[in-house]
Image: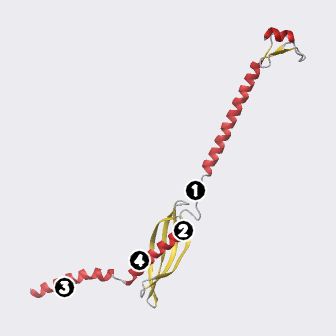
Amino acid sequence: MRTLTMLMVGAIAAQSLLPAVAAAQPGDGARDACSAAIRGEARSRFPQARDVNIVTADVRPAGNGEAQVRGQGEFDDRDRGGVARFDYGCTYSFRSGATYALDIGSLQYAGGPEKKKDNSGAVAALAIGALIAGAAIAASNDKDHDRRDRDRWFSPSDGIRCDRRAQACYHDGGRYSEKWTRRMF
């Protein structure tokens, strides 16, 4: 019974040590250091970058106590709106804990390269609205002008036309009529 108890205690202790051994793999240090370095490099190269995230990270030994980390990242682009994705590469030294040879490339925007906000529909609608409003105002002015023109002239007798605005009357031939002007105004 005592042997069985010792074996059980040993098995439980071994299980509790396994995650600690797995968590201390050398690739994790390289992955974490390169992720932090790439986030900083992305913010430095792209001032519009917000919320830089490392999506994938592939760690491979590079020899001489170094590891190469390659993967993909993304950030929210404040200028263009939407997400920008990029590929990256980084070299990590296990001896010094330093990162170098940072490489960010293949920048692509979600929905295709260089996607920008498209306001052409709004601009077209505004232009069409302005044209319609202008046409309506012009038509209104023409109607008002015709009505004012009609209201301006009147004929008190055959062959006589009087102008309300000028307060003058004229014979058929367009000659001024003092008699009708005095009579009407």
172 sits left or right of 96 in the view = right
For label 4, the residue is 32
Return the mark for residue 46: 2
- Read off the residue under disc 3: 10
Q: Which image quadrant is residue 9 in?
A: bottom left
For label 2, the SS is loop
The amino acid type found where label 3 is placed reads: Gly
- Point out the frontmost of discs 3 and 2: 2
Residue annotated with mark 1: 117
Earlier-in-chain disc, 3 versus 2: 3
The quadrant of the rendering that contains the C terminus is top right
* Depth check, front residue: 48 or 129: 48
Q: What residue type is labelled 1?
A: Lys
SS class of the residue under badge 4? helix
Q: Which of 184 and 116 is in front in this view?
A: 184
| Residue drawn 54% across the image and 68% down it | 46
Give the foreground label among 4 and 3.
4
